Image (cartoon, rainbow, N blue to C red):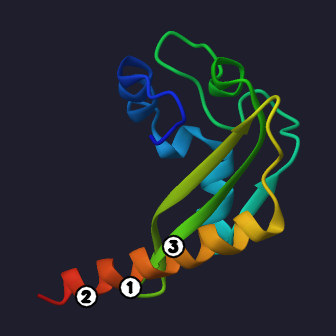
Amino acid sequence: MAARHPDPPLAALLAAVRRDECPLITAAMGRGAPVLAAPPDDESLLGRLPGGRPVIGVLGASSAAAAPLMSRGAARGAITIVRCAGSPGVSFVDLGVLSQIADLTGAALTRLSER
């Protein structure tokens, strides 16, 4: 997790959220394409922390996007960004940059699997 004000305990909790319990990530991986939620319409869109609190509420998310990490024609994971209330929402420019990072990461995964 990268943030303006890092919070290691929160990052550890976020790392415990399973990707298959995060509808935004599941949608991006299933489509093989980026997904933008601005504003998020479902409090469970980013999953729930251990203990049940929705990630959207804990982060104060006003928008989010996920891009799949594609390798050998299949989604191997996803990169997710979240913007919080009071900051500009995730834009299409952000989505383009996120997609490029995901594409480069997917290419790296493919190269690593060839070793």
Residue 60 vs 101, above or below: the answer is above
**Residue at the image point whose x is 61% and y is 54% from the top:** 26
Q: Please, what secondary structure does the residue beneath circle 1 have?
A: helix
Residue sitting at 38 percent across and 85 percent down?
107
Give the CA separation, mark 2 to mark 3. 15 Å
Q: Using the image as rendered, state which of residue 107 and residue 22 is in the foreground.
A: 107
Q: Position of residue 106 (x, y in %)?
A: 42, 78
How crowded is the residue under tag 2: few (<14 C-alpha within 10 Å), some, or many (20+)? few
Q: Farthest residue in the top direction?
A: 51
Q: Mark 3 points at which residue?
A: 101
The residue at which mark 2 appears reads as 111
Q: Which mark is residue 107?
A: 1
> Left or right: 4 with respect to 13?
right
The residue type indicated by label 1 comes to Ala
Q: How many marks?
A: 3
Is there CB contact under 8 Å for labels 1 and 2?
yes
Q: Distance between the residues labelled 1 and 2?
A: 6 Å
**Residue at position x 48%, y 86% in the image:** 73
Q: In which quarter of the image is the N terminus?
A: top left
Task: Indicate the position of residue 100 as horizontal and vertical percent values.
Answer: 57, 78
Assign a secondary structure to mark 3: helix
For residue 2, above or below residue 6: below
What's the amino acid at mark 3? Ile
Q: Which of marks 1 and 3 is in front?
A: 3
* Rendering coords of residue 81 (x, y %): 62, 49
Q: Is mark 2 on a helix, strand or loop?
A: helix
What is the x, y in percent for residue 46?
A: 65, 37
Compute the Cα span from label 1 to label 3. Answer: 10 Å
What's under tag 2, amino acid-wise? Arg
Residue at the image point whose x is 52% and y is 58% from the top: 79
Q: Are marks 2 and 3 in contact (CB under 8 Å)?
A: no
Cβ atoms under marks 1 and 3 closer than 8 Å? no
